[in-house]
Image (cartoon, rainbow, N blue to C red):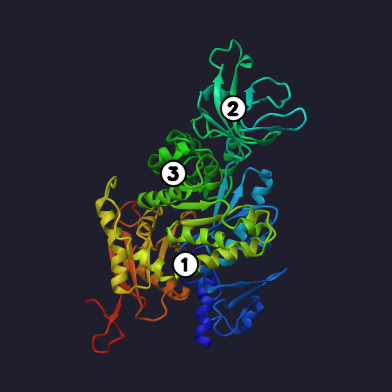
Amino acid sequence: MLVTLFFAFLLAYPSLGFQGRHVNSFKKFKSSTMSALEFKKEGITANPPSNDLRSVIMEGKKQSIVVNPRRFMKATKQLATLGPASNFVEMIEKLFLSGADIFRLNFSHGEHSEKAELVKMIRSVEEKYNRPIAILADLQGPKLRVGMFENDKVNLVEGQKFTFDLRDELGSAYRVKMPHPEILNTLGVGDTLLLDDGKLRMRVIETTMATATTPTDGAVVCEVVIGGKLSNKKGVNTPSIVLPISPLTPKDRRDLEFIKTLDVDWVALSFVQRPEDMEEFRALAGDSLRLMAKLEKPSAIEYLDEIVKLSDGIMVARGDLGVEMSPWDVPIIQKQIVQRCRVLGKPVVIATQMMESMIENPTPTRAEASDCATAVYDLCDAVMLSAESAAGSYPVESVTMQQLVINKVETDEVFRSTLEKVVDRPTADISDLTSHAITNAVGQVAKISKSKAIVAFSTSGGTAISVSQLRPTVPIIAACEDVKVARQLAMVWGIYPLVVGKHDQPFSVTHEIDKVSHMLCDLGFAQRESDLLTFVAGLPWGTPGSTNMIRVTSASGTDYWFDKANPGSMKKYTQD
């Protein structure tokens, strides 16, 4: 019983198993031989009900958090947005313990000083548990809206004409200012306008923008296809055209410069329409941040492969995408995006309305639970919560529910059989066939040898991501020298980032393997001396893109292997 509880602690709190002599990352931690009394002092209760997997209870100031040991063993990552309901350190810690691997800072709201404080809070939780946490900064992007009405709102009926122009007068039931000349100048007869999140639909029947002598003389006349109430500053969507505007507004550019001063890992760009948008974004963001493209425009789907290749990650922003595309198209597009991202080696996040009802209710609808499960079955890298964790009444419950759905799916035989069918990646556009061959083979080696984990020594993160593409059935340990790389990899499916520090001098491959093997024993990934670990790395050591080595070793170290005279036992072999 004591042994069972011991490993439950290691699974639920990996950082408690770190020993100072093996790790040179954030700070030194207590030995894994912590007594029951010491656990009690740390606020951890180790007396769970029998047969209850949720075996570690953290006593918070406001409520108890029940932590499922599999919270730290899931392959699919969770992204939680911070906001008024979760912008204090105690709640951030609870969300982390409940399943959140990445925290999203929404730059549509709040001041720069508030975002800087949130980053400090997240890093304090990271330091406490010695587990890399990723931070995603999400830029607002262009907000296209109609102008103001004389009586604040109007009621539009099907079949009537309605005009958009650039005149400053307050709007009426027949016209309103559209303070975006780029929209009016681009619209042509037959194009579609959607207003108020798609509640109203109009079709262009006439435009005089090209022939107007002054900008205010021109206008775009529409026929109302679906009517309803239209009020001040409601949003506008243009699904049938590509707007000749930058996705980065002046506000976004100021925010991006500030983000570059923060200790964040990813930054997301809204309103991506074409590959050139990501090229512009890359030029402004620099090389220190991983860039994520939010796909919410139909034109972005037309350039899917090009945009994915120019990005470090993709977010399927189903809110605006669902407004501009038919509802029955979005699930198909979602699956296509996930598949292309996996093939091209880029993490993909499924976002928007995943647990929407939990903003006000402690449990989701069955449809929401199924939506989350479907994303996991599709092998996406991460699922995201927006208002559920940022402004809802049940942020902890929302994250916990998502985590429970993930773990239930990932232990299902259908999910396991899906992993078995992921056998290879296309070789097109692969410049280094040696690295490709090694990372393709490592999953099969680990599977056949029954290794407990794949360990990818990764300088830039590329090796670990390549292994993740094939969705192996065992955990992927990304052994990173740089904590920044480890944090960025927290976004990627199946990867458990581990900061191992700079390699010792003089350099020795066997020494590095032995060091990480000891760490994985402390963390509970290997529990017996005969457990095997499959290592993948590149030589010369530390050279990005040089993946060329696979080695299977025992958890005991590189000097130990099976004793043929005593089956199941390990024997130390010395080299002459």
Q: Is residue 176 placed above or below 360 in the rendered structure? A: above
Q: Is residue 54 placed above or below 341 in the rendered structure? A: below
* Residue that badge 3 annotates: 311
* Residue that badge 2 annotates: 223
- Residue 27 can be seen, yes or no: no
Residue 317 in the image, given as x and y percentages of width and height: 53, 46
Q: Mark 1 Cα within 10 Å, few/some/many (few <14, many 20+)?
A: some
* Sequence order check, earlier mark of 2 and 1: 2
* Sequence order check, earlier mark of 3 and 1: 3
Tell which tag, 2 or 1, sits nearer the viewer: 2
Q: Nearer the viewer, residue 317 or 535?
A: 317
Amino acid at pointer 2: Glu
* Residue that badge 1 annotates: 409
- Residue 361: image quadrant is bottom right
Amino acid at pointer 3: Ser
User: Which SS class for mark 3?
Assistant: loop
Question: Is 522 positioned to the left or the right of 67 in the image?
Answer: left
Residue 486 in the image, given as x and y percentages of width and height: 47, 58
User: Which SS class for mark 1?
Assistant: helix
Q: Mark 2 Cα within 10 Å, few/some/many (few <14, many 20+)?
A: many
